[in-house]
Amino acid sequence: MHVLLFLSGVLGNATGLFLFLAPMVTFKRIIRNRSTEQFSGIPYVMTLLNCIVFTWYGLPFVSRNNILIWTINATGGVIEFTYIVIFIIFGPKKERMKVMGLFALIMTVFSAIASISLLALHGNTRKFFCGVAAALFSTVMFASPLSVMVPNVFGTGLGIAQLILYAIYYKNRNHSESAIKDDFIEMDLENIDQVKKPDSRHL
């Protein structure tokens, strides 16, 4: 039973390593072209946070017998850090500043998690806290590629709102213009009637 669990863990680590190495094609292109082009560095920073938190969770003083967890995530952390360095070297200034700012933020978050787990928590409580943090940031990591499409989603929503307002305004405008036109027609008809009627004083 233990052998099967170990082999399953090794297979999982091999799959994880493949996923960490998958962006190598992208970074070969970045190095070749000396530009990050339209690629975003946010997913790599968030993956680094996921790796270091899971590495922390797998260490013996947090949770025992998790050598496979901390080894693969430590390896992934080194790979992701390498990607981030390449991104900073070849990225435009605005993107570099964003990536470096996010990197500083995730290191602050990790430092807070490590400090709380070491100084304030013990035993199973420490393990539970670090496990929840690891699961949370794993979810954030998988959601991070959406950062590219989120502004477009908001933009689409705002565009739809503008079209709705325009349709409402255009309808009201047509209604107002029609009402004004009817008023002018009625006024003209009244003037015509007054011209046609003889003045009784001259009869």
Image (cartoon, helix red, strand yellow):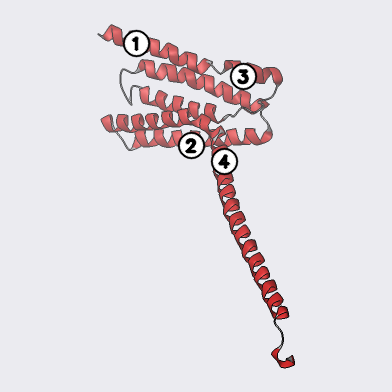
Q: Amino acid at mark 3?
A: Phe
Q: CA separation, marks 4 and 2?
A: 34 Å
The residues tagged by marks 1 and 2 sit, at their Cα atoms, a distance apart of 34 Å
Horizontal side, residue 104 vs residue 71: left or right: right
Q: Quadrant of residue 97?
A: top right
Say which residue label 1 marks: 8
Secondary structure beneath dot 4 equals: helix
Q: How many marks?
A: 4
In percent of the image, x 46 and y 28: which residue is there? Answer: 142
Q: For residue 108, which numbered disc appears in the image? A: 2
- Quadrant in the rendering for residue 121: top left
Q: Residue 4 location in percent, x, y?
A: 29, 8
Number of the label disc, if any, that sits on residue 27? 3
Query: Are circles 4 and 1 on residues that touch, CB within 8 Å?
Result: no
Task: Tell me which amino acid carries mark 1.
Answer: Ser
Residue type beneath disc 2: Thr
